[in-house]
Amino acid sequence: MTGGAGDCSLQSVSRGGVMPLPEVHVFIATSLDGFIADPEGGIEWLTGLPVPEGEDHGYGAFMAGVDALVMGAGTFRTVAGFAEWPYVVPVTVMSRHLRAGDLPEGLRGRVAVSGATPVHVLEALAAGGARRVYVDGGRLVSSFLREGLVTRLVLTRVPVLLGAGRPLFVDVGRHALRLVEARHWAHGFVQETWAVLR
Amino acid sequence: MTGGAGDCSLQSVSRGGVMPLPEVHVFIATSLDGFIADPEGGIEWLTGLPVPEGEDHGYGAFMAGVDALVMGAGTFRTVAGFAEWPYVVPVTVMSRHLRAGDLPEGLRGRVAVSGATPVHVLEALAAGGARRVYVDGGRLVSSFLREGLVTRLVLTRVPVLLGAGRPLFVDVGRHALRLVEARHWAHGFVQETWAVLR
């Protein structure tokens, strides 16, 4: 994407009308006090918790239902450091600084970089046929919420008070929600699926 | 209580040994983003939600199991403004500024004021026979948590993202928790009971 907001809207119109935006789904875990990472960005407090082998808290089924993933540059840097790239669906990294040429060679074609706004990123994904988009990463989730673009949140809370860290929700505006599902596990994780109503 | 920390400890010893502190229980509702009140202290976003008549989300049963209530001056001022004083159990208002003489006449004998620290307030309640104390109000809950004094938290989350307000958890330190119970209601409230392990 190269144009500003005006260009993108024009492109939308030139494609023959307004295309519906894809649904935006969030699947994320927090401490009981709402943090997604400790003050240094670490998640050992989360990954170190005892969880029965093979229990993914619904993540696999969730991933099977989305056709694109949008993440911030911070999340991308973390994931790019893993031994294997974990995603099958196409990934868009939202960043004003990263360039496509900065991507590791093995990821070209699987990862796109966009400096556009949330709504324009969604428009571009809709144009590519995406209907359900997974948005990941704290700052990104808050900015999509703030702009009223999030359809559903799957929130998992783990049995830890962290005391300090990076909060999931920052200045997200006021929204009414509907509880779609609630479940919990014997090892102390609780999870709700919330529909964002407005 | 008139003495400082040293005096209180001395009194403890003079009573013939260390008395176990009472259990501290919390029962509180937050928005999904963790606020107990909006930026002006209002809770209309909570009290205005549709709830089936007679549904108290376990509050009555909870109250029946505690034998004292500790609250901050802010919560006290709100409750003192109600048409009727809603508590049967003795109430301690923790405040460095409020004096017993400031209390409305109808509340004398039912409400005590203490300028002591959380642990000394609990010691005094233990000396009076209290075994399970309900601590209410955002700042107070955080300070009792910070000092490792909270036994159990009953947290109710309601289907609202508020965007801004007064958070429940402020700098509470790191604690491991154990999920004791989880439940939810068709009107979208979810509630967990957590034991604070350390």
Image: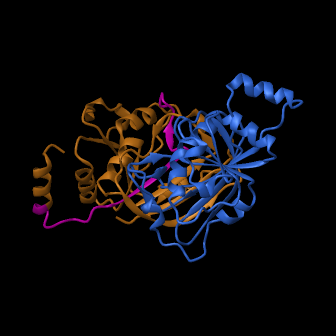
Chain colours: A orange, B blue
User: Between B10 and B160, which is closer to the camera in this rendering?
Assistant: B10
**A155 to the left or right of A52:** left
Residue shown at the point (51%, 67%) measured from the top left: A180
- Up/down of A174 relative to A76, above or below: below
| Position of residue A44 measured from the top left corner of the image (x, y, whole percent) | 58, 33
Residue A31 shows up from this direction: no
User: Between B105 and A167, which is closer to the camera in this rendering?
Assistant: B105
Quarter of the picture holding the C terminus of chain B: top right
User: Between B89 and A157, which is closer to the camera in this rendering?
Assistant: B89
Q: Quadrant of residue A123?
A: bottom left
| Position of residue A88 measured from the top left corner of the image (x, y, whole percent) | 44, 49
- Up/down of A178 relative to A73, above or below: below
**Residue A21 is a magenta residue:** yes
Range of magenta residues: A13-41
Residue shown at the point (56%, 35%) measured from the top left: B96
User: Between B67 and B165, which is closer to the camera in this rendering?
Assistant: B67
Residue B132 shows up from this direction: yes
Residue shown at the point (71%, 56%) measured from the top left: B89
Instruction: Tell me how many marks there are.
Output: 0
- Up/down of A53 relative to B63, above or below: above
Looking at the image, the residue that sits furthest to the bottom is: B53
Looking at the image, the residue that sits furthest to the right is: B16
- Up/down of B154 relative to B173, above or below: below
| Position of residue B83 measured from the top left corner of the image (x, y, whole percent) | 53, 66
**Residue B129 is a magenta residue:** no
